[in-house]
Image (cartoon, rainbow, N blue to C red):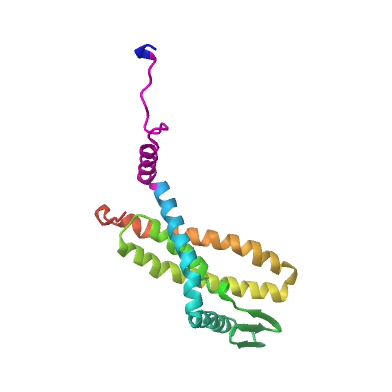
Amino acid sequence: MDADEQRPVEDDAPGKPAGGLARRAREAWDNPSLRFVGLFLAYLGTASYVYPLLRNRYKILLEVMTQGTTKLEYYMFLPFVEDLSTDKSNIVVEGFSVRIIEECTGIYEAIIFSSAVLAFPTSWAKRAIGFGLGVPIIYAFNLLRIMVLVVVGKYYPDSFEFMHLYFWQATLIIMITSVWALWIFKVVIRENPADTDT
């Protein structure tokens, strides 16, 4: 075999798999988009594992959240509805009853949003602002979502399942993404690059 026909051994050749994998991992980590996706999935996966453990341990807090959400919904309807009642996690609007459960508290949306905030490269002070402003906005939007669903269920029952299972689920995704993007453009983008924590 001539010298011209010989090919150098590359890092990802069978004899050196570790070097190729390490190099690819470094390249992926150096790519801001891939790093964000990786961190986001890692944070989201960790939260998905830890949250059920905390939920089982602190059930009383979950009950406080669901009952508190029910009370807020009650007061939101109070100026507009005369036939209105509530009992712990149930709210009855003119005979139409809705039970507020864990998924109605906005906790899962807050977990998704918080994972995205944690994964984005910025300072911890900017992340704190993201949590402090974003989570309440998401919760407030969730309260509005429940209110609309109750109205639809009462007056347009044929559309209730579609609104509940499809329309509002897609809307929540758009809302989470919008609040996250607003945080980036209004808070993170103004920071000094020296404050960035990757």
How many marks the image carries: the answer is: 0
Instruction: Tell which residue pokes out farthest to the right in this image.
Output: 158
Q: Is residue 52 left or right of residue 188?
A: right
Percent coordinates x, y for residue 79 in the rendering: 58, 84
Magenta segment, which residues?
Answer: 5-32
Percent coordinates x, y for residue 189 in the rendering: 34, 55
- Image-quadrant location for residue 78: bottom right
Percent coordinates x, y for residue 119 in the rendering: 39, 57
Instruction: Tell which residue pokes out farthest to the left in this image.
Output: 194
Nearest the eye: 112 or 8: 8
Q: Which residue is painted at 56% across and 75% down in the image?
A: 102
- Image-quadrant location for residue 19: top left
Say whether residue 176 is magenta.
no
Instruction: Tell which residue pokes out farthest to the top in this image.
Output: 2
Nearest the eye: 114 or 15: 15
Q: Is residue 98 left or right of residue 125?
A: right
Percent coordinates x, y for residue 104 in the rendering: 57, 73
Say whether residue 24 is magenta.
yes
Q: Which residue is painted at 48% across and 78% down in the image?
A: 57
Is 61 situated above or below 28? below
Q: Is residue 34 left or right of residue 86?
A: left
Q: Which residue is painted at 63% across and 62% down in the image?
A: 167
If the image is split into quadrants, where does the C terminus sit? bottom left
Q: Which residue is painted at 53% across and 59% down in the image?
A: 174
If the image is split into quadrants, where does the N terminus sit? top left
